[in-house]
Amino acid sequence: MKFVRINPPGSFCTQEALRDAFRERGGTTFLDVGCGGGDLSKLLCDEGLTGVGIDFSERALEVAATLLDPYIQQGKYRLKLGDLHDLPDDFVKVDLAISYMVMEHIEDDVAFLQKIAKFVKPGGNIILGVPGRRDHWSLEDETVGHFRRYDRDDLDAVLRKANLDQTSVWSVGVPTINMLFKVSLWMIIRSGAAAKKNESQREQTETSGIREIPWKTVFPSWVRIILNRATLYPLFLIQRLFYRTGLGVVMMGMGRVPD
């Protein structure tokens, strides 16, 4: 059976939460830190923004380049291979910086946020997605290079320590991701991914966003009939009821760069 990359229900929920956050925070230009395969960059480009994606994984950027080729050809998006901390402070100035499932891979998360803020215009915003709830630490965290998970207060504290204001933290994908958590972990174990525990933290991180795990990140093509934005729309409505709770297995944090 041939498998293709299709977003699982949880990814659809987190992407819709990003749309909600973007509508709240606004902007016309963006930087995607740790863009991976480019799914979130494409979402923002589809919304009419112009952006830049950076990642230190060549494999991930190859995937992103294919996905975002129309926008690259139009000059509305570009990719940069490298590490955030190696960029000069004048690399770019944008209205919005996003970084999804990256900060948990960074030992000094406050310094990471402060570096991102250098690329955001005063009054602009940063939106982050991270694994939520310390009590849900699992094999997946140990095979993809995570240093930590975040409770709601943890993430808010990091945003404030990085000198961001107008901070907000949402629980994302509740109850969908919560209900699928153990199923997802079983699929990881079944795929043999536990062997990645023996890799270095950087090696785990480089492939974390582009892993192909049957029935978790890749599916038979017919599954698109079931997994699409239209059919899953009721889940998006439900998750909004839980944004202000601490229940999320995924947390989304937002903060404004002071004027």
Image: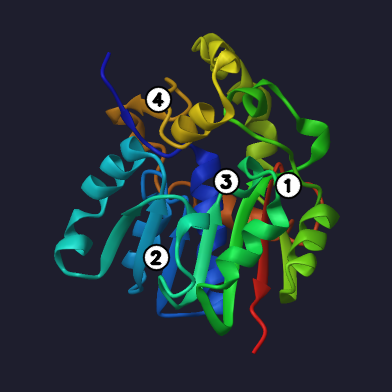
User: Seen in the image, is 125 located left or right of residue 29?
Assistant: right
x and y percent of residue 97 in the render? Answer: 51, 67
Would you call the spot at circle 2 few (<14 residues within 10 Å), some (14-19), or many (20 or more)?
many
The amino acid on which the numbered mark 1 sits, given as a three-letter code, is Gly
Nearer-the-camera pick, 190 or 98: 98
Total numbered labels = 4
Residue at 44% over, 75% down:
90
Residue drawn at point x = 74 percent, y = 73 percent: 163
Q: Classify mark 3: residues with Cα within 10 Å, few (<14), some (14-19) or many (20+).
A: many
Secondary structure under badge 4?
A: loop
Looking at the image, do the residues carrying marks 3 and 2 touch, with CB atoms under 8 Å apart? no
Residue tagged 4: 212
Q: Is residue 5 above or below residue 182?
A: below
Q: Nearer the viewer, mark 3 or mark 1?
A: 3
**Mark 2 or 4 closer to N-term?**
2
Point 71% across, 24% down: residue: 138
Amino acid carrying label 3: it is: Met
Q: Amino acid at mark 2?
A: Leu
Asked whether disc 3 touches disc 4, contact meaning CB atoms under 8 Å apart, the reply is no
Residue highlighted by disc 1: 248
Q: Residue at label 3?
A: 101
Q: Which mark is residue 44?
A: 2
Camera-nearest label, 3 or 2: 3
Q: Earlier in the sequence, mark 3 or mark 4?
A: 3
Q: Mark 2 touching mark 1, by CB under 8 A?
A: no
Numbered disc 1: secondary structure: loop
Spatial separation of the CA atoms under disc 2 and disc 4? 24 Å
In the rendered image, the quadrant that contains the N terminus is top left
